[in-house]
Image (cartoon, rainbow, N blue to C red):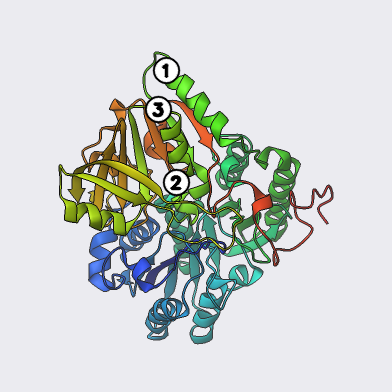
Amino acid sequence: MRIVVAEMSHETNTFSPVVTDLARFSGGGALPLEGDAALKVFRGTATGLGGFIAVCEDAGAEIVLPIAAGAAPSGPVENDAFEYVAGKIVAAIARGCDAVMLDLHGAMVTKTYDDGEGELLRRIRAVAPHVPIAVALDMHANLYPETVERADVIAGYQTYPHVDMDGTARRAGRALLAMLAGKAKPTMVWGNAPMLPHVMRQGTDDHPNRELQARAKQMEADGALAVSLFTGFPHADIAQAGLSVVVVTDGNRALAEQWRDELLDQAWNDRAAFVYRPEPLAESVARAKTLGATAGDGAVILLDHYDNTASGGTMDTTEVLAEILRQGLDDVAVFGIFDPAAVQQMVASGVGTAVTVSLGGKLPMPSVPRQSKPLTVTGRVKLISDGRFPATVAMSRGLTMNMGTTAVLSSGGVDIVVISRHIEPFDPGCFTSVGINPTKHKYLMLKSRIHYRVGFKKLARAIVECAGVGVCTSDYSELTFKKVRRPIYPLDGVNSRF
Ligand SMILES: [Zn+2]
């Protein structure tokens, strides 16, 4: 049995100016990994590919892995990058296989296609109309009907932070193997609700997504092959952005539809709990300062959530950092500011030297009304690093994270990690690998929304959400939606679903 296993994963923020070219899919290398090199890197990791590889090897299947292409969230995918990656996958399938397992995202938009995954699957179906296909998707998928129609089994993450990436691939892969063995007849239905849940309210530790995902898991325990509630990714101005549900049963369409409708009803009834209301930045930072001034264990974490890396932020906006400096918080570690030019200036200056850098605020953001300004910071270059560290937390464990050339700029009581590649701060290694012990600081500033919880929540005594500036703005009124289907909650305050 020969199975094609491949990854093409990107969450597209259509408001982001960060370019998504082939290099971004390459993990810092020249091209995405292929074949045995990719198998070696991903086998045993807590990733979608790691999960698919495990189920295939458990089943004794021959794995063909044409490409492992995952890019950090950013703007629409460049056409040549999409053509390169899709071309590798389609060519491998066209050479012949018994099944296909794809690690996709579900919210990939390219310069040409609003539904990147649907286009990839269309091309696959053109060369292999009947080959069984399993797809693993992110909880932030913005699902189009064509994606569902062209796959046999879809499973999505049930956790946010996404600590079940490998588990999701295993759910999808096992259902497909059961189908291949003639032991199951996957019957898949889907539906959506006209709502854009706010990312800051989607964490599965919290109501209402905690209960929604728990119900989906219960349906699987009660016999469904896979049940997925996709909260969707709202920073994508495409028709199908928003919440959706996919239910796969073993041959029971009526039950699949009943469970789908139950989850959609539950999500819709909880819609107000998915709405987020930002607080003025100066108030948040003042509150954090007060919290840090009282005795207690653990850091006060300030979340710069308007510039969240894992939602396509430029990672170079400086307003939250500037407010931290203005209000004089001390003993702060910051992750991080994306500024390759500032890193190069510090490399040239050398470790231990004093520097004045113009930090961040360099990428224009034409899609949002407020722009970030560079921040002039004088300090000492504390450390230079190649920016690589092994992920050790449940999300991506076993993979090498790559921040690019990295410098730590120490200014007064603030240590700022300045990086050359975008990564989300979910693993404490982003600090410890550059000599910063996050348990020893009074304050941590993180450009994160929910994923920080994987590695940092247990270190925190308090979390303060700080409204800065950026293309992941938590204020929908800063975004201009032209293509998303209307009416949609909460943009239009609709009270009726249809
Ligand atoms: Zn996600």
Q: Residue furthest top?
A: 295
Quarter occupied by the N terminus: bottom left
Please say if 338 is above or below 330. below
Q: CA distance from mark 3 to mark 2?
A: 15 Å
Secondary element at image label 3? loop
Quarter of the figure with residue 91? bottom left
Quarter of the figure with residue 24? bottom left
Crowd rating for badge 2 (residues with CA inside 10 Å; few <14, some 14–19, many 20+)? many
Residue 239, percent across and down?
Answer: 68, 66
Residue 109, percent across and down?
Answer: 54, 69
Q: Which residue is mark 2?
A: 318
Q: CA distance from mark 3 to mark 1?
A: 9 Å
Work out whether residue 36 or residue 2 is closer to the camera in this orientation and state it.
36
Q: Which residue is mark 3?
A: 329
Secondary element at image label 1? helix
Q: Is the CB atom of the residue marked by disc 3 within 8 angstroms of ligand 1's nearest atom?
A: no
